[in-house]
Every structure is written in C-alpha cells, then in structure tokens.
Amino acid sequence: MMLTPVVRKGLWRDVHSSTHLRLFFGSGGSRAANIPSSNTFFRPFSVSAEHSTYLTAFRSQASFSAVSGVIGFCLFLAGFSIVEGSSRRSIWVLTSKKGVFGQWYGLNMRCLAARVNYKTLIIICTLFTLVTVLLWNKCSSDKAIQFPRHLSSGFRVDGLEKRAAASESNHYVNHMAKQSEEAFPQEQQKAPPVVGSFNSNGGSKVLGLKYEEIDCLINDEHTIKGRREGNEVFLPFTWVEKYFDVYGKVVQYDGYDRFEFSHSYSKVYAQRAPYHPDGVFMSFEGYNVEVRDRVKCISGVEGVPLSTQWGPQGYFYPIQIAQYGLSHYSKNLTEKPPHIEVYETAEDRDKNKPNDWTVPKGCFMASVAEKSRFTNVKQFIAPETSEGVSLQLGNTKDFIISFDLKFLTNGSVSVVLETTEKNQLFTIHYVSNTQLIAFKERDIYYGIGPRTSWSTVTRDLVTDLRKGVGLSNTKAVKPTKIMPKKVVRLIAKGKGFLDNITISTTAHMAAFFAASDWLVRNQDEKGGWPIMVTRKLGEGFKSLEPGWYSAMAQGQAISTLVRAYLLTKDHLFLSSALRATAPYKFLSEQHGVKAVFMNKHDWYEEYPTTPSSFVLNGFMYSLIGLYDLKETAGEKLGKEARSLYERGMESLKAMLPLYDTGSGTIYDLRHFMLGIAPNLARWDYHTTHINQLQLLSTIDESPIFKEFVKRWKSYLKGSRAKHN
C-alpha cells in the first residue's frame, strides 16, 4: 500500500498502491503539496485496506522541528513494523519547516522489519509512544488552529460539512480540486468566510475556530476580554460599537450569516431634480409622522397630530403638523393613485341588489334628498342603547375610511375591525364630543366634535388602532404589533346623515389639507404659530416659556401653505404665508426669531433662546420656506420674503464652516456662545444637513454647497479631515 498526502481545500487524499508506504518527514518544502512552508501540521493517519484520512491541524512551534527529526529516525529504525500483522493501526506523521528529513522515502516494510531485534523494537516503540503523548499534550495546549491563508479565506462551515461527507469519493475530490480556484471567489461574494477544521473521529463534524483569550487594557483604565489568533487580536463588537460609535449586525443572505458593519446609521436621499415650490419637499415622501412614538394620536377634531415630545399631556406642535402635511403632499406626488372602494352614496341602485344595511328593531334608515348638497344621503335614527344601524364592509386590503357626516344630536360612528390579535374584534368609536382618545378593553374612542354641519371624516384605521392600544400616560406611545386584518362593518348611532362611505389605500390630500387648514385657523395676529409648551434647550440657556415662535415652524408652515395655494388658488393660504414672515424681522428678545451672529450675520432661530443657539437645520428650513414664498408671491408681494431670504443665505455661506468638525457636523453653536463642549449632530441630523444643502445647491449656484455636500457625505463612510 502507498499513501500520498495531497492537500486541497483543507482535505487530504490517499492513493492506493501495492506494498510500499511513502512518508514525509521534517521540512515542508515545495514537495509538500500546497502546505505553506511557514506552518507545521501534526496529522494522524489511519492505514487499512479501505482507509480514510483524518487530520487535525495545530499551530507550529519551533521546538517541534528537532523532535520531528528524532521521531522520524526512530520510525526509520523501527521499520514501521507496527503496521505488520494488523489491517488497521495509527501512526503519526509530523511535517515541519525545519525537520531533519525532507524527502520522500520508499521502504520495503517486510525487509526492514526483519532486521530489527524484537526487544529493541519494543523499547523504541515505547519511547515513541511517550514522546507522542508529550507532543500531543503540548499541541493540545495551544488552542488556536491555524490554516493556510489561501485556504481559510474560502472556508465556510456548511461548505466543510458537505466536503467532509463527500470526501470518501475520489471522483468528487478530483472534481473539487479542479474547480476550487473558480468556486472560491463566488463563495466569498456570498458571505464572509468562517474557518473550521475536521475532527479526527469521523471527518463529518466541523469544529469551530477557537481563539486564545487575552486581556485587553483600555487606555490604562480598565480591562476587557479579547480573542487572539496569532498576531491578530479581536475585541468584542459590543465594546467596539459603543467605544467608536459605530454600528453592525448579523444578517442572513441565501442561508449564510454575514456581519454588516456601518460607520453611520442614516442615509442621504438623492435629489431627484431641481427644487420647486410645488414639488416634493426634500425627502419628505419617506416621512411617516403619524407613526412616531412621540405622536399621541391624530386628533379627531383637528385631523392633525398631537405631540408629546416635551409633555405627556399632548400639545399641537406647528413643526410636526407642517411636516405631517408636507409628507403626505410629497407622497401624493411619488406614489401611485390609491385604490378606492365605494360602499354607500345613497343614490338609486339596482333594485335586485340586496340592501347591505342592517336596521334593528327600533332604528330607522332611509335615503333622503339633501338640498344643500344637491344629492341623496342616508338618514339614520338609532338610540344610543340600541345596536345601531350597520353596514357590512368586509374589506381586507385597505384601511383608510372616509365618510361625510352630519349629526342632529349626539351620536357616534363606529368601525369594527378584525385584528391579528388572535382574530379578536376591536371597535373604534368616533364620538360627537371633544375627548381626545380613550381605550377600554377592546374599545377605542376618539372625539370628533359635534359635527352639526356637513364635514368629511377621514381616518387611518391602522394608526387609530395602534395609538389606541398603545395609549399610555408617558411621552411615548407603547409599541404594539397589533394590526387590522379586515374592516368588518360600520355602525351609526344617534340622529344624523351619512354619505360617500369609502375605504381606500391612501388619502394623502385629505391629510395635507387638514394640516393646511389647521395652520390657517391657528395663526395669531402677529403672523406666528405660538408653541404652547415650555422648552429647555440645555444648560446655560433660559427656558422658552409657552407662546414662543420657531423660525423652523414658520418656514415649514410657509412651505405647506404655498403648496395649498398653488393647488387651490385660494388666496387665504397665500395671505397666511405672507403674514408668516413677520416674526423673521424681530429679535428673539422682541418675541421674534432673529439673532445676529458677531453683530453681522442675520440668523433665524429654531429656538429663540437667550443667549442665541444658532441651530443649523432649523435655520435652513426657514430659508426654504422664504424661497417658496418669494418664488410664488411674485415681485411685489414677495419683496419682503426675498430680502429676508437673501440676508439669510449670505449668513449661511459665511457661517457654514463653523458647523464642520472634520468627521461630522455640529447641531448648534452653543460651544461658541456658552464656552462649553460642542453639541455634535446625530447621524440623522447630519444627513438632514446634507439633504438641505443638496436642495439649496439646486436653487443657488454657489459652489460652497456642493463642496460641503461632498465632504459631509464622506464622513458617513468614516472619512476624516487631514491632520497637521
């Protein structure tokens, strides 16, 4: 029999012959068939008529080189007669870079064994066994497993399992030997490598790569446990993540685990086209204001979000309301038209079609003419103590419900939902009172006001359900996984009229105009939208008492109102936008939003604090609003907006470098105004800065905006400014 060790992708292959045994001692030269000369491999061979080869690899150690020569010489004298007389024995082969023997020897086993004295052979074998045990103990104490670089780079656990199971087939091994160079790059593209090794008991089980544990002293202050493999030291990512403020997670692609590392967590949106006042507002088509946990609910009376960011009681925050409107306006431009299902119009229909309304005893339902609307409507009378008149809906796809409503008395319109919560039924009641929101068992209540004149009620049932179930007394809505599966039916109680009952995929324009109308109704005589909550920006700043204005609120409100005007040509919206420029002209101390930096540069404050804070993103939003107004109002009406805009842009170009840290951006200038540590912008604010500059670069040709966009984008990938 002849054994030839062949290394291919971490596997050893044997070739049958007749009566000779070929062994490799000592130095690992070029004859070592893909074994790198820098490594030492200690491998057991199992010899039999139908043998298989198993191996365990250990890290090289300098002392093994001399020992390998001694063992090789002893084996040479012994003539390997231990193989004689048995069909299966184990012998050890040690290969090393500095071994004594570095050539292949063909020995006639029977002839050599005959020349050795039996007692001498026993002594030699005993010594060999002792040395083997010592070597085994020494090798096993080194926990690290070292594979050749070019082999380990292509290993994966599942790949090793498959190869081990198929290693009994020489045909498969030959095929893999031919295909390995082409296959490895493809595997590396799918997922990062995972290094493993075969055990010596069967070859099919994979042993994970083991590392030495090592203490890592951090800044001479504390110690953490790391892992060491050769000259490489690995630190726990839980520590790396916090220390360097980076991000990573294990994800799975095509059945393979992969670790994805990122220097930042926020992304920049590409500017689709030059900005226009009637187009998409920045990247707001991706905003979902109503699902924010700091939005308590969408008010049933006002139809806009109620915020809890700075107080659990809830308050109307003009910035949030404007963003709610702008996001739905932008979605309406970028999304496909909604699917709308009409369930009731009260008009004459096919006499043969069954009536979908259920009218219990003691209740009344009829189609009547409504002169003010020049159409028929549904009149209903249903006592509060009754089941109410109900309309079967059965919609399982869409969850935006809309209906025209007029109450003659107190009443309610309720919607029954089948949910993902064990298919339980939840009922959302829209009641003719001013209660904000309530939740009891499986009933959710929203006050929608008296509704004694015709109005349209449009509600997102998904949002209303989740805000109701997640209702809490804290600033944040409790997270919940509940979702509606089916809109089962609508129930009406009290006395009133219903018309145009529909369910649709979206209702973006209804949300947009709810925000626009709120802004018109709630603008004060000074042209501002006062914020009725106390705001403490930070240590060193005086608190802003309820009633303060925000330049960011003014700017985003103007952008909303301009779009409402361009859609409707209703001058009510344009007039409101023009009045909104008034707070820009007054200093913060005069109940305005203006600050002056270094007695030279006008700045419009998101938070008009004392001392001034110079928040960057709020200032740029205020400028975008002024741009929308000056472009829409024309030369005469837009004169004041144009002047405010131009002074603000001059300040931005002069002060923009103050917000660059060399690796990120700064939220405000408190470090300059208060002499404290800078307030670094989070990555989501950093990308907001970039998105704003991208927009401004399409309406102003100054190269500074594109230069800063390019540099600030690079910070997201870990780039840093050069040092001295």
Image (cartoon, rainbow, N blue to C red):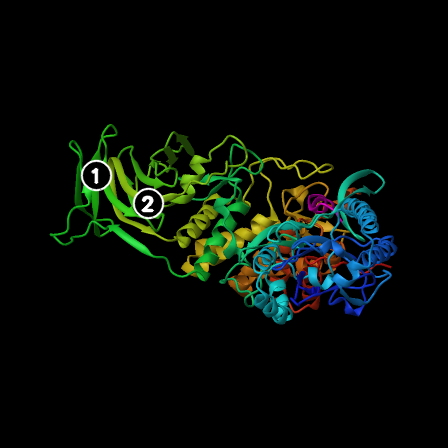
Residue 602 visible to the viewer: yes
Range covered by the magenta-colored residues: 234-243
| Most foreground residue, 114 or 616 | 114
Residue 553, horizontal then vertical, whole percent: 57, 48
Which amino acid does the dot numbered 1 rest on?
Phe
Q: Find out whether residue 236 is within the magenta segment.
A: yes
Which of discs 2 and 1 lies nearer the camera? The answer is 2
Q: Decide if residue 676 is on the left or right side of residue 338.
A: right
Residue wearing tag 1: 380
Which residue is most to the left? Answer: 351
Residue 702, placed above or below residue 535: below
Residue 507, horizontal then vertical, whole percent: 39, 52
Q: Which residue occupies 63% across, 69% down?
A: 177
Residue wearing tag 2: 486
Q: How far apart are the two marked residues, 2 and 1, measured between alpha carbons?
A: 25 Å
Residue 635, horizontal then vertical, whole percent: 55, 65
